Image (spheres, rainbow, N blue to C red):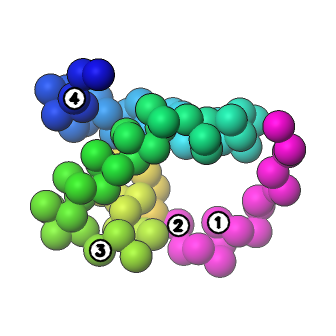
Amino acid sequence: MTSLAGWQTDDLKLVYRVLHAHLMDHTELMDSPLFAALQSHLQAEARKDGVDLTDHSAWDAWLGNESTPCDERMKGRRPLKPV
């Protein structure tokens, strides 16, 4: 397996944002070892940059997403489709 450390962080953030945006339509991604490894790698990088991962707005901002409060984000959520 190739380490994700060899890839540019900005490229990995882009891939993560795109995959994460489609989780509701492709719930199998939640069980994907690649997606989990990508998320873990990015979280480790964010921690190195001093990001508090318990603060979803800080995590979103670090990823390059628009920062949206959790209560706002949850308003438009739809239930997950079983796989």
Q: Earlier in the sequence, mark 3 or mark 4?
A: 4
Provide the residue designation for mark 1: 73
State how many labels appear. 4
The residue sitting at 22% across, 29% down in the picture is 3
Q: Name the element at disc 2.
A: loop
Q: Earlier in the sequence, mark 4 or mark 1?
A: 4
**In x, y percent, where is residue 48?**
13, 61
* Numbered circle sitting on residue 52: 3
Amino acid at the residue labelled 3: Asp
**In this rendering, is residue 73 above or below 8?**
below
Provide the residue designation for mark 2: 68
The residue sitting at 41% across, 59% down in the picture is 60
Report the quarter where the C terminus lies. Answer: top right
* Numbered circle sitting on residue 3: 4
Q: Write down the region rendered in magenta.
A: 68-83
Q: Which-is-in-front pick, marks 3 and 4?
A: 4
- Rounded to the nearest angstrom, the CA distance separating label 3 from label 4 is 24 Å
Question: Disc 3 vs disc 4: Cβ atoms closer than 8 Å?
Answer: no
Q: Earlier in the sequence, mark 2 or mark 3?
A: 3
**In x, y percent, where is residue 51?**
24, 68
Q: Nearer the viewer, residue 15 or 71?
A: 15
Amino acid at the residue labelled 4: Ser
Amino acid at the residue labelled 2: Thr
